[in-house]
Every structure is written in structure tokens, then in C-alpha cells.
Image (cartoon, grey):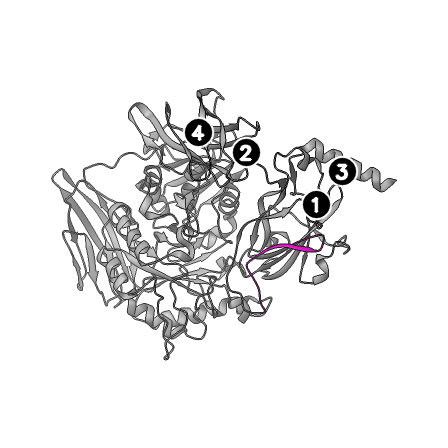
Amino acid sequence: MKKNLILLLLLALFFKAGAQNISLTKGWKLSIGDNPEWSSPGFDDSGWQAANVSKNWEQQGHPDYDGFGWYRLHVIIPSSIKEKSYLKDSVLISLGSIDDNDEVYLNGTLIGKYGGHKGSDIKRSRYGPRSYKIAANNPALLWDKVNVLAVRVYDTGGDGGMYGTNFNIHMVDIMEGVHFDTGSDFSYGEHNTLGKSIGINTSNNYPYKGTLSFKVTDPETGAVILSKKTDTAHFTTGVPFSWWFTFSAAKKKSYLITYTFKDKKTGVELSETETTPYILTPAVSKIPKINGAAIFGVRPGHPVLYLIPATGKAPLKYKAQGLPAGLKLDAATGIITGTVDQKGSYPIVFTVSNKLGSNTKKFTLAIGDNVGLTPALGWNSWNAWGLSVNDEKVRTSAREMAGRLSVHGWSYINIDDGWEAAKRQDDGKITPNEKFPDMKGLTGYIHSLGLRMGIYSSPGPRTCGGYLGTWQHEDQDAQTYSDWGIDYLKYDWCSYGEIAPRNPNLEEMKKPYLVMRSSLDKVNRDILFSYCQYGMGSVWTWGAEAGGNSWRTTGDITDTWNSMSNIGFNQDKMAPYAGPGHFNDPDMLVVGKVGWGPSLHNTRLTFDEQYTHISLWSLLASPLLIGCDMGHLDRFTLSLLTNDEVLAIDQDALGKSARQYIKKDGYQVWVKELKDGGKAIGLFNTTDSYQTISLPKSDAALKGYTKYRDVWRQQNVTSASGRVAPHGVLLLRVEK
């Protein structure tokens, strides 16, 4: 009787919460290890650890753990979700994202799996969202009874476990295969008008006929700016419905757009929201201006490649006063090449001119033991192309960087995983696969543009993508990279977890990076060394000592507010370890079109969140590595990446990372010291609504500072105060 009463109470709670969608966010249990009995519905998991599925398992008491873990959940699935569904044949179980591979059991029956683990033969990491469909009449599914979900997870490295935001059970209904296509770019018209074409697509054969409603809202005031609808939204498989709209965006802020389609026959609705872009970065002047860092480091006798980054109406002419012997400047391109044998700090004055005027800048060429004196500015292929990267995509990225970004200081083109051949040559030399027919030729092409070339590997036998790693070929691979002309190496822990002990100590964590550091030191070329080992062993405390130019402090970033903000706003303890030549790396940027494979989408970050992303990473003195499709840089993304005053904060020669100065429930303030005695200050709104954030002039952080500048707008302001959008930022530079 007591058991039945509890069941009725639980069912009542589900009905109250909404019978169409059963939340799976609470009640999970976690155990580290592996045991086939843990899939059984009768197993007693009462002694297991309570799990928070919004966080990875490293954050729940299992730091640096790679291997197996299990999650279990007891959940009632009420038959009402089937009764109220138009289609009644299948149930969809969504499990957030899993890092990396999984098997999912419902009441002891395997209903789905992704990725794989066969002894030590891990073919590929499969981190990502998981959803599994099961027939409504499958005997493993117990309607109106307690069901046991058991999820077996295998983590290959870095963050691990099952975590994210989308945990639920619902019927596969008529709108399951329908989605709004909002991927087209906004167009910008006169008088602050925005226009866009949207579509509705489906993979179902059902002939959809209904109403498409469209509403634009000001999130600051709640006022509806525009509302309209059409009753002609008809579509089916292969025949999408498209609609063009325009509206006036009166102010430079983001507006909220809500699209709603209602099917006439069933009454079922589908809704989606997105925000609108607003550009703060002023247009570039036609008068010459020299951008970029004020210092560049090279080791004695190693090749110098430096492009003077300057904007202005072409053609530009370049001069450099004080170039040391051994270097030459191409006056038409601004590219400096050569070698300098003698250590020293060489002061140089750059001059760039055109028919409209000229501009000069003091610059220091530091010939010595340190390189990478300011954080790397460049592009990495992973967040856009994943393992589908190829020669053509890299060349496209290089051309776009040379044509649109290098004048602002961007300089690295980095190939991530997926370039390696299936096996080494007989002499052990590594070669590229068929996607990269001429790696040395590709590097030469990139160098001819004044840009630098980066590559990827792992200290283990395989990379994260299952390609050849560097294990036991460190000297050979370093020499090969040098022969190709490589300037940057990302070195990913990955399968080295199979070489190191299960719970490696600090010395074992350092070992593969020290070995490769020694190999890189043997070649006659500067190759920036980027550690990608996810922050294990508090790498920021020893990364510089072990010869790293940067080191990842976290697991992989995704294009969500939860991922970006959790990573960015948790970098304070790493800040003291940043400095010239050695920087904390909270992972690559997720602005523009991303996708981690051949299919791309617009980043899921709102436009306000993207301003926060670039502002926070710049304050942190982080490497800024673009992760989007460089062949499709829309106007807004380009404005994010070409604000020279924002980039100057990241590239400041002092090399200090910002510190978390204020942390409240609704906002944070971060402060970064600058080389000229000024400060960069970020006021971040972490809530879902507009608020005014102020730092009084009497505050200790502002004492003695009289000049305030809004860096994104490049305008002087009177105070460190302003209305800040949800998840947005006010980025200031203050000077005495």
C-alpha cells in the first residue's frame, strides 16, 4: 500500500511538471569504475555518489580521472505522454552530452551506444550530445512504473562523464523532424534596419500546413517592436518554406526574435528564439594605423618571419628604422625575414604610409631565449572542421586571414587533428595523409602571406581522432616539423593516458612534455609549444618551467553560455602564472560558424555572449585562436575579431592576466594591469536581464585614474558604469 501511494505521488508530480516532457536532470547516481552488474535494474545503487549532470565528473571529486564510470537513474515514465502525443510509436531519451563514449541500458536492455572501447584500442573520442530512440511497445520500457536508466561512460582524456543541459524523455511527435533554418546571415540596411531569410525544414513526409508567427522584442523594456504572421507556411520533405523579413533596430543592442509555427491540422506548435547582431567596432580609417603587439621574440640564429600589421587604404608603404643586421623588409608587403645571431633587445620604429598620411610605432625585437612573448593570435581548424580538415580548407583560412585579419595582428594558421597518414614510412618518418598532399608546400604558401603555420600531435601512440601520435618518435617528428617550416605545435595528451599510470603523479604528467620540449630545442626553428592536457596536475604551476608557451587550463569548450562562462569565469587561480612567453589557455574561440566536422552552424552563443567571450579571453591574456569557418566570416564576427583596442588588451606586453576583482550573484568585475600603467576592466552581467553595473570612482581599483574609455565603441566615457545586457559586458580601459 505504501509503495503504491509513493508511486501515485510521483506520478502526480510528473503530471504537474508537464506530461509531454519528463525531466531527467535530477536523481542521478555515479560510480567510478566498471562492472557489468551495474546495468541490472535490480542492482542496489543506494551507496553511490549523488551526481550533478550539469558538471563533469572531474568537478565532482574525480580530478584527472580517465576511464570508465557509470550513471544510474530511477524514473517513472507515465503513459500520459503517449496518450497526449499525436504520434504514439517512439520515445526519445536525451542525455545531454557524453564525454567520450557510452552504452545506455534501460532496465538492463542495451538501447544504444556511441563510440567504442576495445581493450586499449580506442578508435576515436565521441564527445557530444546523445539522444536515443526506443519503440513505445519495446518490452524494456515500463509504462507508469519505475524504470532504471544505466549509462556506461568511457572517458579517453580531459573532462569526462555525462553532463550538459538537455536531459529528458518525451514522445517522438509530429514536430520531431521539423526545425527552423536560421543559419543565414543578417543583412544590414540603411537607417539601422536588419533583414534575414529564415526557413522551416522537415525530414518527415507529413504535409505541414499552418501559420508562421514572427515577433521582435526589446529585452530591456519588454516592448514588442514588430509582430507579423503568414498563413501560407506549407512544407514537407525536400520542400522547405522560406520567409524574408526586415525590421528597424533603433539602438546598438541585441533584440529577441521569436519564431512560432502552428500546424493547422494538429494544433501542435514549434517555437525557436534567436537574438540580433549589433556592431560596436567602428569602421577602420583609411589613414594608416599600425596595430599588433609592441614586442616579438625570436631565438638567436632562428628564422624571423614578421608581418607589420597595419590598416589604411591600399597601397601601403612600409619602413623599419633600426632593423638589426641579417633582416630585410619588403616595403610593399610589410613582411620582415632573415636571421639575427646576436642576443639583444633591438628597438625598431615602424612607419606605414599611403596617399592620405602616415603612422609610426615603436617596436622591440627581442632576440633571446623566450618566444611567444604575447599570446598567439590565429586560427585552429578543430572547432570548425574537426577531422574533416584538408589542404583546401586550410588555404582558404590562410587567404582570408591574410586579406582581412592579418592587418590587425592575426598570424597563425593551425591544423588540428586529422592530417596524419595511417602509418609511418619504413624509416619511421611521419607523413601527411591524402588530404594534405604537400605539407611543406602548404607551409611555404602560408609563409608567403606573412603568416605562420601550426600543427597537432599527441605524446601517445594515437591522437584523439585515432591518427598517428608521436610516441617514441619525438626527435624525428620535431625535425620533420622543422623541415616543413612549422611554427606552432599543439600537443594533446589523448592516448598517452595508456602509457602513463592510471593515476599519474606530477612527474609522470610532466614527462611527455619535457621530452618533446627537449626535441624541439634541438631544431633550428622557433616552434611555439602549446600543451593540451586539460589542466591536469594544475599545469599552470609548472607549465612554464617545463618549457610550455601556453597550456590548456580546462576541458574542451562548446558554443554554449554554460560552457564558455564556466570556463572563463573560473580562471582566477591560474592568473598569477601568466607572463611573457607563458600563458594560460582556456581553449579556442566559439564565435562565427562552428561545428567540429563537415556540418557547421552559427554559434549558439548570443551576440551579447560573444562580446563577453572575446572581452574575457582578452582580459585573461589568453591565446586567441579562432575556431570558425574562415571562408564565411559574416560582418558581425569580423567586427569581433578586428577591434584593435580590444586586441591590444590581449596583446599587452606586460603579459598579465586579469584578476577577479568582484564576484556577486548577478555580476562580476575583472581587472587587468597594463604595461603603460593603465588598466583594462570588464564589468560582466551574469544574469538573464539588463542591469546597471557601476564601479565608483572612489573604488581602490580606479584611484588616480581620470581617463575612461569604452573599448568596444572606442569612445571616451565619464565613468565605469553602464547598462549591461544579459550575459553581456562593458569593457573599459582606464588611464591616469
Q: In what element is the residue under mark 3?
A: helix
Does label 3 or label 1 sit earlier along the sequence? 3
Query: Which residue is situated farthest in the bottom direction here?
Result: 427
Q: Looking at the image, can residue 521 be seen? A: no
Relative to 217, say whether 476 is above or below: below
Q: Nearer the viewer, mark 2 or mark 3?
A: 3
Across and down, in percent, residue 262 comes to 52, 27
Residue 247 image point, x, y percent: 37, 24
Estimate the x, y position of residue 55 in percent, counting from the top left.
59, 48
Left of 712 or right of it: where is 697?
right
- Left or right of 81, for residue 633: left
Give how far across and how far down residue 90 sits, in percent. 62, 43
Q: Is residue 327 visible?
A: yes
User: On the image, numbered disc 4 is attached to which residue?
Assistant: 721
Compute the Cα span from label 3 to label 4.
Answer: 49 Å
| Disc 3 versus disc 4: nearer the observer | 3
Residue position for label 2:
666
